[in-house]
Amino acid sequence: MVMNFHDVFQNAPVSLWIEDYSAVRALLDALRDQGVTDFDAHLKAHPYVLGQAMARMVVVEVNATTLKLFKAQSQDELLANLHRVFRDDMSRHFACELKRMWNGQVDIEIEGINYALDGMPVQVLLRRSLLPGHEHDWSRVLISITDITERKRAMERLAASELHAQGLFEHSPVSLWLEDYSALRSYLEGLRAQGITNIRRHLVEHPEVVLESMQRIRVVDVNQQTLELFGAASKTALIDNLHRVFRDEARRHFEAELVDLWDGKITAEYEGINYALHGEPVDILLRRTALPGSERSWQRVLVAISDITARKKAESYMQYLGTHDVLTGLKNRAFYEDALHRLQAEQRVPVSVLVLDLNGLKPINDAQGHEAGDQLLRRAAEVLLKAAGANDVVARIGGDEFAMLLPYQDERAAQQMHNRILHMAEVNNQFYTGARLSYAVGRATAYAGMALEQAHHAADQQMYQAKHAFYAAG
């Protein structure tokens, strides 16, 4: 019986790829012909070579296991979305591979992370080798990819266990807590024995259960990093004052943990807020797992706490930058457009739109410099913020252009807002010397059935008419 190697390839229980690297080899040979001898230095000086090499790798065929691993319906779908499979650190990893290829080392074995088309990361072991007969031109390369995600997770759990067993608990750079959850487990089992089946409803009806559950967790030990993180002089000082660490937000977050524990999920990861003994809140990332042998009793539970306060502040600042204009502190165009779409979807009609342009900004910039122009922009924003209501959206949507969204406000309210802005601008001018604050204003109101973009456009056109009138009047 003759073996059909294509059937073997297609039905292999491991992900297999046949690729053509001949163009990559041709690129490397061309660089040698150009006199390149130090490829590492050349790559640093000409990083685009990396992209050129990646673009020359041609996937000839993949097997059925590959499609299953990466959640693709067909080879065409997979090949059209390779940028979603190989992303993030792919370029850095491929740079190392390319240096090996420069030295003639095509055969490799590496670990890394790829991504299925549904976005889930897949930790992989990749092996690559030249097929016999293609060593001279690299036109056929066989790649196997093994999913080692579960193995890596098991290794991480083992590493955590070994960390404790080796006595590194005390000097870990992460806050570690050894805790006993067995009394809490018994308490939850007692609730089940009373006929409780829906823990969420029970917590709503008996909120005191959250605190009672927290009090049944016994802290066995903490490490030095924990004392530093929470500002405690000693372990006794910390343990005796846990009510000051786990309060307010911490108790509300524990309610979500309690629901998971009710479902038997002892290994988990949460973000929340604890408090240092001096009262400052600490944003934390909490990881919890039962140590080996305590999976059923919960008698030895290891909790690791990372201080993510700086990260949270950075995220908050980045979120601010994504939605605000830095110069004026107003919302930016992206936020305004999102609000426009949100109000349209929620049908909060009527919605009035004001589009405002700052008169005379360019002459100020030209005559007095951009610092004077920026000051005028900040004054314009200050007036709009003071005029706006709590639910109004005020945004800077262009260089000298602003916009306001007034939910549940009709033409009369828009007119009143218009008048209030002009009045407040006059008041503002009395307190500042130099450039005079003046707006060209357009307004429109959208009712049910009218697109908010249409109202914005109408207000925008009216604003331009007002602006032309302003300059025509001299």
Image: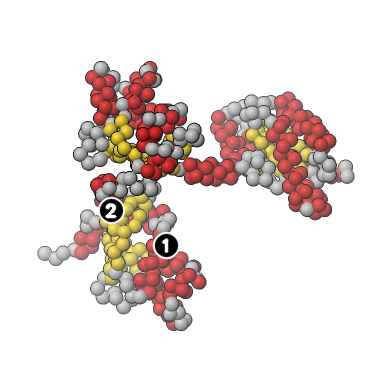
Residue 143 lies, in percent from the top left, at 29, 63
Local crowd at mark 1 within 10 Å, few (<14), some, or many (≥20)? few
**Depth order, front residue of 421/316:** 316
- SS state under label 2: strand
First in residue order: circle 1 vs circle 2: 1
The residue under the point 27% across, 53% down is: 148
Amino acid type for the residue under numbered disc 2: Asp
**Residue drawn at point x = 33 percent, y = 49 percent:** 71
Assess disc 2: are there few (<14), some (14-19) or many (≥20) residues with their C-alpha within 10 Å of its C-alpha: some
Residue assigned mark 2: 147
- Res 366 visible: yes
Q: Do we see residue 284 in this rendering?
A: no
Q: Residue 383 versus residue 82: which sits nearer the camera? A: 383
Residue 433 percent coordinates (x, y): 84, 42
Q: Is residue 423 left or right of residue 192?
A: right
Q: In the image, 315: left or right of 213?
A: right
The quadrant of the rendering that contains the C terminus is top right
Taking the image as shown, residue 309 lies to the left or right of residue 341, namely left
Mark 1 highlights which residue? 92
Q: Is residue 103 above or below residue 183?
A: below
Displayed quadrant of residue 216: top left
> Could you say where residue 394 lies in the image, as x and y percent from the top left?
66, 36
Badge 1 marks a residue whose secondary structure is helix
Q: Position of residue 47 (x, y in %)?
A: 48, 68
Residue closest to the eye, 249 or 84: 249
Q: Is 113 rendered above or below residue 443?
A: below
Amino acid type shown at disc 1: Arg
Q: Nearer the viewer, mark 1 or mark 2?
A: 1
